[in-house]
């Protein structure tokens, strides 16, 4: 009879852990831009970016830019100047992979 008790306790623990993990993973907060400014930014100040989609938990489509000083800026995703900034950052990251000591590579993420 003790064997059944151990088995039931084991399955109860497994069920509890599975439910707890499901609830925990479902509550991961999303860092979203709530608004953006359509003000041109000097591309040399930007070191990284990411795209934000409205269908993935955020209310607007935007591009998130990170400056050399660690600031986060939200800008419109579909503007031509934003595409130029993203293109520059990709080029900068490629350059910094080849020449990490270059002064333009300060605070650039080498991914």
Image (spheres, rainbow, N blue to C red):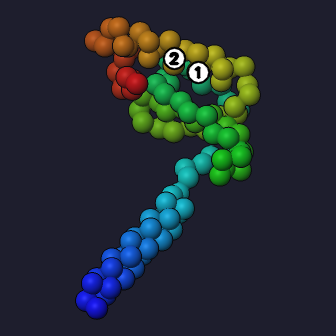
Task: Answer yes or no: is residue 20 visible.
Answer: no
- Residue at the extreme front of the image, as rendered: 1
Q: Position of residue 62 (x, y in %)?
A: 67, 37
Left/right of residue 60 with respect to residue 106 in the rendered view: right
Under tag 1, what secondary structure? helix
**Circle 1 Cα neighbour tier, 10 Å, few/some/many (<14 / 14–19 / ≥20):** many
Task: Answer yes or no: is residue 67 visible.
Answer: yes
Based on the displayed image, in which of its 4 quarters is residue 4 positioned? Answer: bottom left
* Quarter the C terminus occupies: top left
> Looking at the image, which is closer to me, 18 or 39?
18
Picture layout, residue 72 above or below residue 26: above
Based on the displayed image, in which of its 4 quarters is residue 13 positioned? Answer: bottom left
Q: Position of residue 43 (x, y in %)?
A: 55, 19
- Residue at the extreme left of the image, as rendered: 2
Residue 102 is labelled as none
Query: Who's the residue at 65% across and 24% down the image?
Result: 82
> Looking at the image, which is closer to me, 56 or 7?
7
Query: Who's the residue at 28% across and 91% down the image?
Result: 1
Residue 86 is labelled as 1
Under tag 2, what secondary structure? helix
How many labels were placed on the picture? Answer: 2
Query: Who's the residue at 60% across and 48% down the image?
Result: 32
- Residue at the extreme bottom of the image, as rendered: 1
**Circle 2 Cα neighbour tier, 10 Å, few/some/many (<14 / 14–19 / ≥20):** some
Give the CA distance from mark 2 to mark 1. 6 Å
Query: Who's the residue at 67% across and 41% down the image?
Result: 53
Residue 90 is labelled as 2
Left/right of residue 107 with respect to residue 54 in the rendered view: left
Disc 2 to disc 1: CB gap under 8 Å: yes
């Amino acid at each position: 009879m003790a064997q059944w008790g151990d088995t039931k306790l084991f399955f109860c623990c497994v069920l509890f852990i599975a439910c707890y993990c499901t609830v925990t993973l479902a509550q991961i907060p999303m860092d979203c831009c709530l608004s953006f400014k359509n003000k041109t930014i000097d591309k040399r100040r930007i070191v990284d970016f990411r795209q934000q989609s409205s269908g993935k938990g955020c209310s607007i489509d935007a591009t998130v830019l990170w400056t050399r000083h660690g600031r986060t800026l939200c800008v419109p995703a579909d503007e031509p100047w934003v595409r130029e900034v993203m293109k520059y950052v990709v080029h900068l990251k490629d350059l910094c992979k080849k020449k990490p000591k270059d002064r333009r590579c300060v605070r650039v993420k080498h991914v």
